[in-house]
Image (cartoon, rainbow, N blue to C red):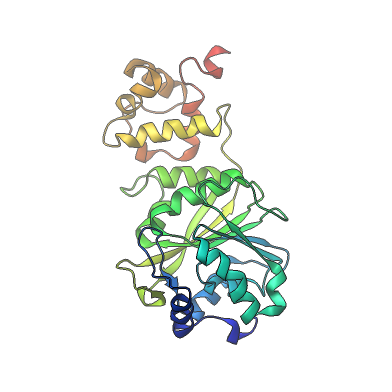
Amino acid sequence: MGDTQALLGPADVRELAAALNIRPTKTLGQNFVIDANTVRRIVRVADVGPDDVVVEVGPGLGSLTLALLPEVRQVTAVEIDPPLAAALPVTVAARAPELADRLTVVRDDAMRVAGLPGPAPTALVANLPYNVAVPVVLHLLATFPSLTKALVMVQAEVADRMTAAPGGKIYGVPSVKLAWYGDARRAGPVGRAVFWPVPNVDSGLVAFRRGVPPETTASREEVFAVVDAAFAQRRKTLRAALAGWAGSAAAAEEALRAAGVDPKMRGEALDVAAFARIAQYRPGGATESE
């Protein structure tokens, strides 16, 4: 995989950070990967190839970027930190000059980016800041339908929530909303020692493949509104939790029964298809009007 000498090790990361006068901040969730084997593993598990256009969020000093560039058609790196965004092309030009033309850096907030230059991205591969991991993934999947797969490194607890199945305590909004877009699974643990600074939590890899959304006459926004309402009061029955969404508990029960869902159930028991059915029976909605 490319030139081993191009990849960043612990000394390289610290040297680059010092040269840029960068001190990793919790605000931006900056924990830089300092282990070359870890970035090789991420690229391997991501299953990307020479036809892929990868969007990388938060490339930081370039550890993962340098591992991706030899394997894919293009890397579009979205970086919110101006000094890091400016330094990344310089680092790549110095360490892998023959690959520099495959890199495009976009200085933007990944939770708000509405478009990217160049070919449409086909894969998301990123070491995501813990505090924004789920919103970033959901926003990018919604904004770029061309993304067919993803491999993200996130906090282990977040990875569990993103890939949880119905029926468990950790199953919730991230699990259901990600399932709307496709199938997510845990793709292995990541230890703390591969980061600088060392975080106080473990990390994990989440692999994703885009699928077909559940069949429903409701829009994605309408389905997600039901999901948000159901888990805002997750200890309550759906009849009670969806009362505000439907206008009353009685109206919620009517919608639930029309969707074939027991009003006494709780949101954590339902898969995304059930939420999609409920959404289309909201009082005053399209299905009822018809």
The quadrant where residue 50 appears: bottom right
In the displayed structure, does residue 242 sit left or right of residue 178?
left
Identified at 39% across, 74% down, the residue is: 196
Looking at the rendering, in which quadrant would you find the C terminus?
Answer: top right
- Camera-side residue of 164 and 85: 85
Image quadrant in which you'd find residue 1:
bottom right
Q: Indicate the position of residue 39 as horizontal and vertical percent values.
A: 52, 74
Q: Outermost residue, bottom direction?
A: 5
Q: Position of residue 26 (x, y in %)?
A: 35, 61
Residue 138 sits above or below residue 124 on the image: above
Which of these two is toward me, 183 or 41? 41
Measured from the top left, where is residue 46 in percent x and y? 58, 66
Q: Residue at x 43, y 78 (%)?
A: 18
Q: Is residue 59 visible?
A: no
Q: Is residue 280 visible?
A: yes
- Left or right of 168 on screen, residue 140: right
- Percent across and percent down for residue 260 are 45, 26
Query: Residue sitting at 59 percent across and 87 percent down?
Result: 5
Taking 200 as reference, is 55 left or right? right
Q: Is residue 195 above or below residue 51?
A: below
